[in-house]
Image: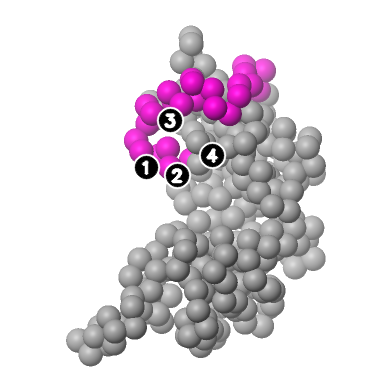
Amino acid sequence: MTDHPLLDRARRLWSDLAGAPVAFKDAAIDVAVSSRSLLCPPGWVGVVGLGSAVIGTAPDGDTAEMVRASLSDLPSTAMTDPAVVGGRLPVAEVLGPASLAYCDVAGFRPVGFEVVEMAPAGHTDVGTLLASVPAEDADESGLAEITSPAFVVRTGSEVIAAAGYRTWPCSTAHVSVLTVPAKRGRGLARTVAAAAVTHALDGGLLPQWRARPDASRRVARALGFRELGSQLSICLLPAGAAESVDHL
């Protein structure tokens, strides 16, 4: 899988997002010190595994060295496993892991989307959809951040499902999908997502699907996305707090 074009493009993307020179190497995790990392929130440790290689970013040199020393002997998949990482590092909080999946024209399995309308990203009806679902669902979807048109399905005048994407570096389309809770399980997410992915592929972009919920991952797989890795963000305990925990 290391020579697969999708994997190569995904690795270029996340190396760029690290904000400092870093490379995916099969031997061990490569950790860079980066204050501009987009692998994680500011001040956190970010870990991204793609294929059999892993990169990471840390806010300072001491933290970077601790991450290298603590994780380098682990299998690549274990480096984004919160339970495993929590046994090696003084973890205060984690985000993830989120799966990272990608597709290309050859692997894409679209569905008919003749009922899908295209609307501007900031359309008020999309905003109404976002406001109608739990805040956690809205945040997880990322729909408020899309830069593409929104692809929507309506019941009457009400938008009940929408998808789009935000343009990321390295010609990447970060896909977002949201369906109202009462209409889930009916294939609407796949329908609107197929329209968004088609738009991205037509523009020469690499569609990326980042997800934690199993339901979202199933939609991605149904469309032909390949899960190539995962992302984990880690907030470490302050040095003094970590030492106190060690002595309990």
Q: Is residue 7 left or right of residue 48?
A: right
Q: Earlier in the sequence, mark 2 or mark 4?
A: 2
Tell me the distance, in whole angstroms, between the alpha carbons under discs 3 and 2: 11 Å
Residue found at the very far top of the displayed protein: 156
Image quarter where the C terminus lies is bottom left
Return the residue at label 1: 136
Tell me the distance, in whole angstroms, between the alpha carbons under discs 1 and 4: 15 Å
Return the residue at label 3: 130
Secondary structure under tag 3 reads helix
Residue 89 makes an appearance in the image: yes
User: Badge 4 local density, few (<14 within 10 Å), some, or many (20+)?
Assistant: some
Disc 3 + disc 2, Cβ < 8 Å? no
Q: Earlier in the sequence, mark 1 or mark 4?
A: 1
Residue 97 x/y as whole percent: 47, 60
Secondary structure under tag 4 reads helix
Q: Amino acid at mark 1?
A: Glu
Determine the image quadrant of residue 187: top right
Residue visible at 68% across and 73% down? 21
Q: Earlier in the sequence, mark 3 or mark 2?
A: 3
Tell me the distance, in whole angstroms, between the alpha carbons under discs 3 and 1: 10 Å
Tell me the distance, in whole angstroms, between the alpha carbons under discs 2 and 4: 11 Å
**Magenta residues, start to end:** 113-141
Tell me the distance, in whole angstroms, between the alpha carbons under discs 2 and 1: 6 Å
Q: Is residue 129 left or right of residue 122?
A: left
Q: Amino acid at mark 2?
A: Glu
Residue visible at 42% across and 37% down? 138
Disc 3 + disc 4, Cβ < 8 Å? no
Disc 2 + disc 4, Cβ < 8 Å? no
